Image (cartoon, rainbow, N blue to C red):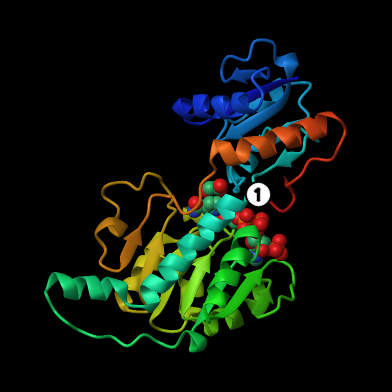
Amino acid sequence: MAILIQIGEFHFQEIWRDGFLAIDPNLDLRIWPDVDNPDDIEAVVVWHHVQGSLTAFPNLKVICNLGAGVEAIFKDPDLPVGVPIARVVDPRLTRSMAEYVVLHVLRYHRHFAETQQFQAGKQWRYIAPDDAAATTIGFLGLGELGLFAADKVRAMGFKVAGWSRSAKSIDGVATFHGADELTPFLQSLKMLVCLLPLTEQTTGIVNARMLADLPDDSYFINAGRGQQVVDADLLAALDSGKLSGATLDVFHTEPLPDDHAYWGHPKVTITPHNAADSFPEDVCPQILENIKGVLSGKPAKNVVEAGRGY
Ligand code: NAP
Ligand code: GLV
């Protein structure tokens, strides 16, 4: 069995190679572009791979993505047919995302940005926090990440609502699904958290129409993907006062270009796509187990579907 590692940014490839070799020093690993004989490759481990490059391996049995979001794989119009695609579902990544969401929900809820400004001016000023029990946090996406983060926010006493593609019934969460239920979902929220995968349906979903359905003075947190937001519409909503602020972890172009309006915007908090990461020590074991399982005839775990794009 030979495994090919192909990661968009070359300098990371060695870190992942070392992560796999730490588990099994005898693994036959090939590091893109040094494939040697393409017939040897039975599994690929990818992150932003070169489009069209995966059809070169006639014996490929599984494609493993190094992260949770798989849009970079499905962007490839030339994927090998019938080869399962697995993504990362990892407890540490899931916990990190919940930390990120809780941090930014509380930061807004407890008026932390204003408090820091008051400190800078040596002002002893008190702002009463709203009652969490009267504050609804809405999650676009109730998957591995959205559901776990929603649960943590709910544990602090907030009301929680969530929107997904399919109908769900979740204790303590007001659930909505599909295009018809998007407006009623949005209308009750104080904060909106986006944890959707990037697909054809979710591209540009956070646009003027959606933002208009939010109550005035609400807050937006995006840790899904930048392409889900129409930047001009978000900026207009911030400037008009419709939104009181936004925390953004993901952007159309990363790193965020120096001249982007978000950088200097007084209502925007920027983080460098670090809400939740994959680390070799956590993720290599599950990927290797998955590969070994597939090669011994078991179905791949954490499989995504081309038909729905996630
Ligand atoms: P997931 O388990 O696949 O969950 C996706 C959720 O989105 C599901 O609830 C799904 O609905 C819903 N959804 C998908 N398409 C929809 C649509 N058209 N309309 C309504 N709901 C839709 O994914 P996850 O593991 O939670 O990850 C979500 C995303 O987070 C990833 O794809 C990635 O882009 C992003 N992410 C970001 C970071 C970061 O550091 N910023 C880190 C990791 C992941 P159903 O439940 O009905 O299927
Ligand atoms: C990170 O953004 C991921 O998709 O894992």
User: Which residue is found at the position 60% from the left and 59% from the top?
Assistant: 145
Asked if residue 71 is positioned above or below residue 97 in the image, the reply reads above
For mark 1, give the secondary structure: loop
Residue 282 sits in quarter: top right
- In percent of width and height, residue 184 lies at 60, 83
User: Which residue is found at the position 52% from the left and 58% from the top?
Assistant: 97
Instruction: Kindly identify which residue carries mark 1.
Output: 89
User: Which residue is found at the position 65% from the left and 78% from the top?
Assistant: 173
Report the amino acid beneath label 1.
Val
| Quadrant holding the N terminus | top right
Q: Residue furthest top?
A: 36
User: Which residue is found at the position 64% from the left and 19% from the top?
Assistant: 25
Q: Is residue 248 visible?
A: yes
Q: Nearer the viewer, residue 269 or 26?
A: 26
Relative placement, left or right, of 51 versus 299 is left
Q: Nearer the viewer, residue 19 or 238?
A: 19
Asked if residue 210 is positioned above or below residue 60 in the image, the reply reads below
Is the residue marked 1 within 8 Å of ligand 1, measured from its CB? yes
- In percent of width and height, residue 93 lies at 56, 51
Relative placement, left or right, of 190 versus 197 is left
- In percent of width and height, residue 46 lies at 60, 33
Asked if residue 32 is positioned above or below residue 208 in the image, the reply reads above
